[in-house]
Image (cartoon, rainbow, N blue to C red):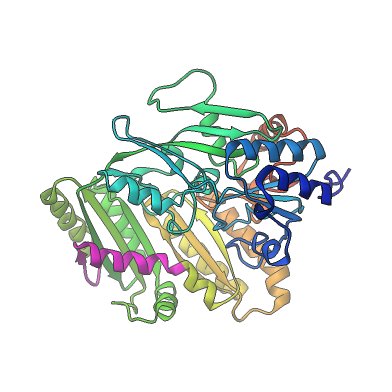
Amino acid sequence: MTEKTRFTSVTDADVQAFERIVGPAYVRTDPLSLDKYGRDETEDLVFPPEVVVLPASAEEVQAIVRHCYRRRIPITPRAGGTGLSGGALPVFGGVVLSVERMNRIVEIDDVNMMAVVEPGVVTADLQRAVEERGLFYPPDPASRFVCCIGGNVAENAGGPRALKYGTTRDYVYGLDVVLPNGRFLRTGGKLYKDVAGYDLTRLLVGSEGTLGVFTRIVLRLIPKPAVQWTLFVPFDDWTGAFQALRGIFEARLIPAAVEFMDREAVRLTAEHVQRPFPHADAAALLLIQLDGDDPSVVERQALRVGEVCERAGARDVQVADTPARQEALWAFRRAMGEAVKRASVYKEEDTVVPRDRLPELLRAVRGLAERYGFQAVCYGHAGDGNIHVNILQRGLDETTWREVLPRAIRELFEVVVALGGTITGEHGVGWVQRPYLSLALSAESLRLQRRLKRLFDPRGIMNPGKVFPDG
């Protein structure tokens, strides 16, 4: 039995069953909806589902999943649809189960410093709600104004502040999950200590929708830092930026974030937002965010960071110490992905290496670009070693793009793994990174993970075709 033939197609009777569960208004089969839910933010991929179903409760999710399990209909869970690895695309048709209506912040618990949310809550909405109470939810993916907590948990989303505060995984303390057979599982809770059995919560975080559908999420919160400063530092040589990065940590300073942007990334973004950017001709720019509770301590840290950067050859060190000035810098950084997308058809490779190997990674990227004739635009979270390598089609013919470029990408990931890195830092494996998974994981690791997938999902209906090279 092949991957495609092991599933059942959606029938009119299935659509009617879904309408009975969620109501006719929340079952979509029209062409516009199928096209919309057949796309995410991944480059030029379209996989239309046969039907889109939008439940409003855990009970409705459970009923949908049970029906699909009985009928062997593939299910693709979806939250905000902002993924960059094709993880929420229904590559075998079937049902897209969108949790966008499940968007309640159920509770903000000030005493235990926990939030309980549904998976369709927009990340920035949760951050605003907790910050109004002096609390802080640190994970900050670039799409946080539109992405959802459920998708963040499924992908173990990161962002700039992962350097100091960690990724989504470090804040998920409990999950309610509908398993592929329709049964209900609750893991963890409002507990800082819990070693009863295997840690299924951490297994499910980052599972990319292949092991179940999240319906309720318990998140740890921390006190909101009272002070934030951002330093803007241009360099005439990108190696100087990485020398400064090294010096910051050798000085035992831990910024909240350190972002790297090369010249072309800055130029494309300035064109996209249609406003000039200071030092746009610099070879590289660093954005360095510092935070804390004592203004004098943060100021001293900023002075020390500035000194380190100047010793590394910084052209200038500018300080944004007001919310408005900082937001202008970070809004520019957040616009970078969209700017690249508008410039050309592209492929974004989510590389991550130990941060002291970043100079070697950038040299390898430049060497591959010269050898294969492509243009690479690099930016990302230098503080945690996660650089996004954007390969533009501009100037490449279609044959080279489709048939030759995959060899260059494979070589890139071979270099990344040799440097102690891996094939994805925060975007997930999804659909597009599957061919490279065996570079990063041993045969034994892949065998165990496939067995886990079969244990959770014996019929293979939950987000099929994702993560593993053989589906």
Instruction: Looking at this view, name the residue that lies furthest to the top.
Output: 196
Query: Magenta stretch containing residue 325, yes or no?
Result: yes
Q: Is residue 422 left or right of residue 162?
A: right
Please tell me in which quadrant of the rendered image residue 86 appears: bottom right
**Is residue 312 among what the camera can see?**
no
Closest to the observer, 335 or 101: 101
The magenta region covers: 312-336
Instruction: Looking at this view, name the residue that lies furthest to the right.
Output: 1
Estimate the x, y position of residue 148 in percent, counting from the top left. Answer: 49, 51
Closest to the observer, 85 or 236: 85
Q: Quadrant of the N terminus?
A: top right
Instruction: Looking at this view, name the residue that lies furthest to the left.
Output: 296
Q: In this view, does 30 lie to the left or right of 83?
A: right
Please tell me in which quadrant of the rendered image residue 220 appears: top left
Q: Is residue 322 left or right of residue 100?
A: left
Q: Establish if 326 lies above or below 227.
A: below
